[in-house]
Amino acid sequence: MAMTGVLRPGHAQIRVLDIEEGVKHYGKVLGLIETGRDSQGRVYFKAWDERDHHSVILREADSAGIDFFGFKVSDQATLDKLDRDLQAYGVKTERIPAGELLETGERVRFEVPSGHLIELYWEKSDYGNDDTYTNPPPWTDDAERGIAPIRLDHCLLYGPDIEKVQDIFVNVLGFYLVEHVIMEDGKTDLAIWLSCSIKAHDIAFVRHPEPGKLHHVSFLLESWEKVLRAADIMSMNRVSIDIGPTRHGITRGTTIYAFDPSGNRFETFCGGYQCYPDWKPIRWTWDEVGAGIFYHDRKLNERFLTVVS
Amino acid sequence: MAMTGVLRPGHAQIRVLDIEEGVKHYGKVLGLIETGRDSQGRVYFKAWDERDHHSVILREADSAGIDFFGFKVSDQATLDKLDRDLQAYGVKTERIPAGELLETGERVRFEVPSGHLIELYWEKSDYGNDDTYTNPPPWTDDAERGIAPIRLDHCLLYGPDIEKVQDIFVNVLGFYLVEHVIMEDGKTDLAIWLSCSIKAHDIAFVRHPEPGKLHHVSFLLESWEKVLRAADIMSMNRVSIDIGPTRHGITRGTTIYAFDPSGNRFETFCGGYQCYPDWKPIRWTWDEVGAGIFYHDRKLNERFLTVVS
Amino acid sequence: MAMTGVLRPGHAQIRVLDIEEGVKHYGKVLGLIETGRDSQGRVYFKAWDERDHHSVILREADSAGIDFFGFKVSDQATLDKLDRDLQAYGVKTERIPAGELLETGERVRFEVPSGHLIELYWEKSDYGNDDTYTNPPPWTDDAERGIAPIRLDHCLLYGPDIEKVQDIFVNVLGFYLVEHVIMEDGKTDLAIWLSCSIKAHDIAFVRHPEPGKLHHVSFLLESWEKVLRAADIMSMNRVSIDIGPTRHGITRGTTIYAFDPSGNRFETFCGGYQCYPDWKPIRWTWDEVGAGIFYHDRKLNERFLTVVS
Amino acid sequence: MAMTGVLRPGHAQIRVLDIEEGVKHYGKVLGLIETGRDSQGRVYFKAWDERDHHSVILREADSAGIDFFGFKVSDQATLDKLDRDLQAYGVKTERIPAGELLETGERVRFEVPSGHLIELYWEKSDYGNDDTYTNPPPWTDDAERGIAPIRLDHCLLYGPDIEKVQDIFVNVLGFYLVEHVIMEDGKTDLAIWLSCSIKAHDIAFVRHPEPGKLHHVSFLLESWEKVLRAADIMSMNRVSIDIGPTRHGITRGTTIYAFDPSGNRFETFCGGYQCYPDWKPIRWTWDEVGAGIFYHDRKLNERFLTVVS
């Protein structure tokens, strides 16, 4: 007990229009560490402070967006149980064989009603070795190569039927609702933030007519000063910044939204409080949604609701 | 699943030699919010960003130290199951009736082999109200009254038989080992850091001949700049600082150790990485224990191993 | 020698449309300390870490803007010499008698070709007392009341003929050029940053057809984390933010621009490098002026060039 | 006027016991940029944000310590005038020919009563080029190589007769007293902090029986977070830390004292307020000198008063 079942976001496969341009962005500018390339030409990355073999996979394609978002679960029994529970709930699942992603075991893949592919898996190689976990320094040179986030943290997905998505994440996968935004009608959710841990969000959804869209994949930084450093590095490298540095009212995180060369939005953020499943969800009313999303400006920019990949 | 069972440290009852001096320290200097006093004369406090009625209880006594340290669990069924599991393991448990602590439900109390009283409970009143959880600002004036930690975070206890303690926390309560320090013999643990979440520590133990001792109760701050502010406020109020601001190698947290007027050590800290139960524990060897405890000085001060309450 | 002549910006008299609304903004939200009101109804403020009696004076008027910006000089002899030098240069000067501003000695006032009134003075009462300067703590409660800048730092003024203004500030008053922006023609200055110390700017000018306009008065904060805190407090108090938190390329300062209730822009900023008069000025070319003004966005918002008071 | 006469600390020549060990420390660990070596075997360094050719010169010798500390003045006329003024005051001066230090013009050298050699000069080559000063980014990769201070900032020297030293710095060189510590007798100064700018110290002296001793040479960092980073890098490189991270009461700076491999103390610090010559000096009484030097501990460690090189 305590931390069981779904542990954390483990990987996002992102489509880029030009793989080498993508490698330059995610490797040199964002500062992820390239850990492998597979026979399909996909390129694998991990953040400096992640232990598993990879968290970001780039795939060259004709359109930007996210192929799938995967969560690591605690063990084989959990993987099997969640697979059965999903099927019992009426969600069709598929098994992707071990090795289809480098250094990764069998994955259970399923589509949620918002049109996104979600995966569960429990095995991925530890990239470190015994030395890594004996008397380690608090950080290494890799922590200052590029923006150098600590980890892939969460993603925000756009699509329809988010209440159905919430039901699956909460009642089958064991997540809980942390915050939500209510629409003008005073009852329908515009957006939901869900956690499987004590992070303010492990995944989030915004209601949107078109299914399967990506708003952003998010990477964690260590401090507000690192957020400034990230913005500086973005400018030095002519990365297109959407908004920030600023603060979200929702989750309280400090943040920058920016775009990769293919037009996929990504976030580098810090903070956000730590929450627990016994906490009452925080509710944002329609008149305050601007402050909820961008606390300083107190208004949405149009791009927030319309530009997705 | 995900976050189940034991959720988090919920309260510490601390003995102080003079209750009003204690109230001044924990209320005005540390900046906790007083939330109640009971018929026994105990005084209750919560941190500004905590939701439950209290996390620190002060009791006037002839000697300093900790009476008990309590964890909130997810629900009644979990409380009952953990009680049964403890008994099945051979740990004697006791039920403390609801209301014995203000605004708190029934507690399951037991002694671990290190000589400390640990409690489990699942009900404690939410101190906020509906307004608190609708369109909230990221912080309020209370976040700047005194040192103003976010929450009670963990404690470090000194006592014998810590491997037996670890066995109970891991195999009965669902915690996992995050880091440990190995003694000169290359095999016996000097100290263990245990988590029931993704915090680098929810509780920790150091091997010590005398049972039931408190090394420190720890309070979380939001940034390294808040650690500096805490040190400044300590100096302004003539709080006796043990060490810091500095960094721990273990958990990477940035920290100050200081003493309350009764001689109980407390910590105000920030950071520390977030970990998961599938991670290999980090091991500190005897020759590097100094850097593990105080990363900058790379040596223990004598007080770390000898001064407890 | 060393620091002589003109020492620093000493006061700005700002016009507000409603004095009590202004007092609330500059006192409660910005967190300046009210130090007096005079028979004309003007209200005086100082920042918590300033020593002189005031740095901001509010005057109720029908239009927003700045009445005058004053510099403290080192002594009476300097005041008299600068007055003579100004007149010799062809600048008409006027003596404002001691006491016209509370706790302030005689001022020498003159208009520069951009249409702004500049003042020099050397006497203003120290607001502290002997105790203030014996064993002081590094900060006091006032440092956390509202945004609580350290001091009035500089102002940016809009008007014509800025090369003539520069000539007076440099060749009569002893300032030096720190940075400048060059217009599309590759030779005319659009903007100039001038220092009389080692600050990256004590005053700055942007070329503008209309004389005597105020772009912003600027207040110094201690850290980038205080800039975030300032933005949070602005949002909490519904202060209209123009842009930020962000960084200027010019001077490297981290910044927020916002508006007081009368529409006067003000800046709360941190940082900026320290410079010396033997340094070659930094030059921004027209194609990079966006990055110079707002380093992260790399483009001017229209308000920067058009909204002044 | 404004900034005239003596501008700033320009160089310190430091004696090290082993030149390559010194180069490794000042180059790789402290992160200064090596800019030259001369025929005497001296090695020259500048900080990444300094413009002049060098600020630190290492000389191999049998004992650690400081050979001389030099100030840049505004021009030849100032150099000549200060030379005459020093002689008129009774201080013997010596002219060191241009080129004796690489890329440096003629220097005026003199000994102050504390037994230290001080130098004045006005010419030193700018290390940058035109490109450096056109549309510059706020920082470059060099700002993250090693500890990477912004500049040589000041030094603290130990020796006798500091009131005589103060008289020369104030009445001949144009410095002013910013803070001072008074001894048990209530009148004699134990220590003095002197500024020729708006920095809280450009040079400082502590009364000490032995002449010509170095307490520390100090390097400026940009933030308290960079102070933490500096302490981490020191630990990673086994640099011996004297004290810190902590705060000085005097000047309010946040600081680390540490030792180079030869035993010369150096400081990496941030902050400290900005002051002006019209300000009343801050006075520390004997009973509060501990808080003045180390604000958090409120007591001197013995090394502060006894270990010098």
Image (cartoon, coloured by chain):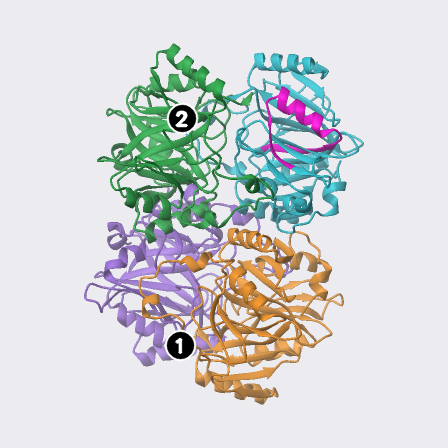
Chain colours: A green, B cyan, C purple, D orange
In the drawing, does residue C118 fall left or right of residue B169? left
Does the segment drawn in magenta span residue C185? no
Give the magenta range. B152-180
Spatial distance from mark 2 to mark 1, Cα to Cα?
82 Å
Q: Nearer the viewer, residue C205 or A66?
A: A66
Q: Secondary structure at mark 2?
A: loop
Q: x, y (%) of residue B185?
A: 73, 39
Q: Is residue D304 above or below residue B28?
A: below
In the drawing, does residue D276 fall left or right of residue C262? right
Q: Which residue is mark 1?
A: C82
Q: x, y (%) of residue A157?
A: 32, 29
Callout 2: chain: A
In the drawing, does residue D205 fall left or right of residue A180? right
Q: Is residue D59 above or below residue C129?
A: below
Q: x, y (%) of residue A24?
A: 32, 47
Q: Does residue C1 appear anywhere in the picture?
A: no
**C-beta proximity under 8 Å, tags 2 and 1:** no
Label 2 or label 1, whichever lies nearer to me, is: 2
Q: Nearer the viewer, residue C251 or D103?
A: D103
Q: Which label is found at residue A216?
A: none
In the drawing, does residue A69 fall left or right of residue B281? left
Q: x, y (%) of residue A87?
A: 37, 12
Q: Is residue A195 above or below residue C52?
A: above
Q: Nearer the viewer, residue B69 or C82?
A: B69
Q: What's the amino acid at mark 1?
A: Leu
Quarter of the picture containing the C terminus of chain C is bottom left
Q: Which residue is mark 2?
A: A98
Quarter assignment of residue D204 = bottom right
